[in-house]
Image (cartoon, grey):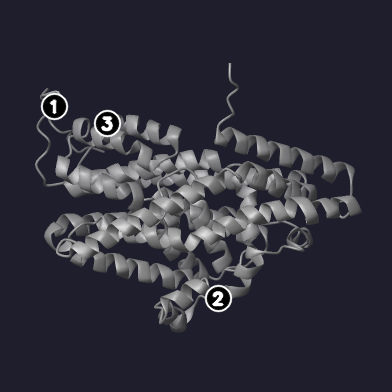
Amino acid sequence: MSMRWPSLQLQMLIGFLIGLGAGLVVNATAAPDAAWVAALTTYVTQPLSQVFLRLLFMLVIPLLFAALVMGVSEMGDLGSLGRTGWRTLAFTLALSAVAVCIGLAAVNLLRPGEGVDPALAGRLLTGAAGSATAILERAPSSLEGSAAIVSIIPSNVVAAAAENEILSVMFFALAFGIGLVLVQDRSPAAATLRASIQGLFEVVMTLINLVIRLAPIAIACLMFNMAALFGWELLERLGAYVAVVVLALGLQMFGVYPLVVWAFGRMSPLAFFRGSHEAILVAFSTASSNATLPTALRVAETRLRLPRHISRFVLTIGATANQNGTALFEGVTVLFLAQFFGVELTLGQQVTVMAVCILGGVGTAGVPAGSLPVVAMILGMVGVPPEGIGLILGVDRLLDMCRTALNVTGDLVVAVAVSRGEPCAEADPTGTSLPDPPKPSM
């Protein structure tokens, strides 16, 4: 009988526990600056964790470009889609904006990362090298003012990519995607180009899946470094961080979504959640919007009785472009790590973080851990040490499941809102007549 390796998620948890446990033992029994500890972190754990981070950073630019272009191009022909396309886009951006605002408000009010000894945080970053240092050196000195807005538009997109000017690359990708939408139906060459970009996206995602296989080792190394320095205080900070993320996700799920379903979709929130629970559970268990798509389509047509052409359009796009749970998570994570490392972000910088998170939600792959490269990119862009992402890797699986459930629920909410005024589906695939649509109530 062949022995089966544990799942990647279990391997990541094991790596998290091993690194955390070993680091706590070192913190309790030896001085963090002891010679053997310094040698271990300098020549073993630090390089191994940096390899993982460098590989993630290497794939950020092609991932964001391909995902954003595909996300926009999947809107179809904006001219012919008219109201449906624009309403889908409006609801998608609005829900993502509200989600990020909730997340930023929660982390600013509760401040889960505040109170860490600046000297300890500084020692953690001492000797950090590789991609993290390079990204920090290229991070913009200011993210405020009209000059920053103008600088988003690249004069040379290749140079912008080389200088890690992520906002400029994202602006170009959005413009490129819109141009592709406008010409793809009447240009065979444009259709071929779109297929090539889809191929680029699939190649990059394959590489990211390979890189993520190194995550258990990287997590163990990163957690050892931080636990050896911070001790039990690290666990307290992680617990507070998880609580803030779950609180913000809950406010969006049970506060914002019911209101949108009732006000714009004229559907009872209770009826909506009763009809959607199967898709929500599948999303939570798989942590993948893409894997949940078949279930979400079936739920929308047979349980919620949404028009087939609307549900298929909105949910297919939403699996990639409506990741408001992911956008919320990214915003909370960036501010938490900024607080942890004592990096003060101004209101203007936080607004920029919010905008990047909304766009990152459009360009984040709907697969497990798909948001990690985007989080790492935003950290470097605003001057927060990107290696700090190791803090949240060990708890990311649980949060990934929670935010994916929010993402898929948000897709169904948008489908309900966009479907208002459209004729309902008359029968399920088995031919059985369906009951009358639920009446709006509060």
Q: Amino acid at mark 3?
A: Gly
Sequence-first disc among 3 and 2? 2
Name the residue: 57% across, 44% down.
242
Residues at marks 3 and 1 touching, judged by CB atoms closer than 8 Å: no
Which quadrant, please, contains the C terminus? top left
Image vertical order of residue 386 relative to residue 395, above or below: below
Element on which disc 3 rests = helix
Q: Is residue 131 left or right of residue 80?
A: right
Sequence-first disc among 1 and 2? 2
Image vertical order of residue 393 relative to residue 145, above or below: above
Image vertical order of residue 332 relative to residue 276, above or below: below
> Which residue corresponds to mark 1?
435
Q: Is residue 117 left or right of residue 82?
A: right
Q: Nearer the viewer, residue 250 or 223?
A: 223
Name the residue: 31% across, 39% down.
293
- Residue 363, given in percent of the width and then of the height, sits at 39, 57
Q: Nearer the viewer, residue 189 or 102?
A: 189
Dot 1 alpha-carbon crowd within 10 angstroms: few under 14, some 14 to 19, many 20 or more:
few
> Which residue corresponds to mark 3?
275
Between marks 3 and 1, how big is the CA–CA gap?
A: 13 Å
Dot 3 alpha-carbon crowd within 10 angstroms: few under 14, some 14 to 19, many 20 or more:
some
Dot 2 alpha-carbon crowd within 10 angstroms: few under 14, some 14 to 19, many 20 or more:
some
> Which residue corresponds to mark 2?
140
Q: Quadrant of residue 296?
A: top left
Between marks 1 and 2, how big is the CA–CA gap?
A: 57 Å
Which quadrant, please, contains the N terminus? top right
Sequence-first disc among 3 and 1? 3
